[in-house]
Amino acid sequence: MTGSARIPASEGAWRARFRTPHAALEWHTVVAAPRMGTRGWARAAASAFHDATSTLSAGSDHWPQAELYELTYLPRLRSRERAIAWAALCDVEALPPFRGSIPPVKQPRDEEWRNLLIETRRSYRERLIGYGDGLPDIMGTLAGSPQQWDVEAYRDRFGAVNWESVRADIHSAAMSTARETPYGMLWVDEG
């Protein structure tokens, strides 16, 4: 499925952008997701589609060396507050990290549990660095702020940012978390 294909209204989708850094060739695809799924599933689905079509469309060996530069979940409904609530519900084990079956209740949902949920949501609001569809969207809203991540080291020689490398470094630094939700991405301070 390409970016021009229609996505059913009941689904979200993953947008993938592949690029060959040595030739500045770029290829986009959108993979429909009836459930949010995991980044691993989305990466595999987009890569399989890329591999299947690259030999047909390129006619050369440029596409096989393409790297995944961006993988962004495009939610059907975007909402900062719902994203925060969803992340908090996952943290108190009321929801699984990705849509699917609801896990068995490990803790009774009493007043203490409700207070924990309220505190977790408050904590997310206080630690939130940015919200958007993905890192490019979030970084665009943080321009000039002290929280903005310096992306110059992640640019290829043609100026394109490898957002997957940025995301991996944010994850490995463990000072903040880029968290996908069915309502958009949260970038949360963990320091």
Image (cartoon, grey):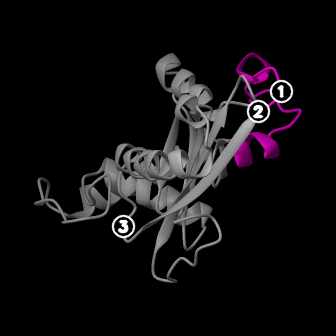
Q: Spatial distance from mark 1 to mark 2, Cα to Cα?
A: 6 Å
Say if residue 173 shows up in the picture. yes
Q: Mark 1 points at which residue?
A: 158
Q: Which residue is drawn at 72% across and 22% down?
A: 22
Can you name the residue that lies furthest to the front here?
Answer: 59
Q: Which amino acid does label 2 sit on?
A: Ala
Q: In which quarter of the image is the C terminus?
A: top right
Q: Which amino acid does label 3 sit on?
A: Arg
Segment tinted magenta in the rendering: 136-160
Left-right relation of 44 to 67: left
Label 2: how many residues lie within 10 Å, few (<14), some (14-19) or many (20+)?
some
Q: Position of residue 97 (x, y in %)?
A: 31, 52
- Circles 1 and 2: CB distance less than 8 Å? yes
Asked if residue 93 lies left or right of residue 184, the reply is left
Identify the disc placed on residue 35: 3
Q: Which mark is residue 24?
A: 2
Residue 54 percent across, percent down from the top left: 54, 46
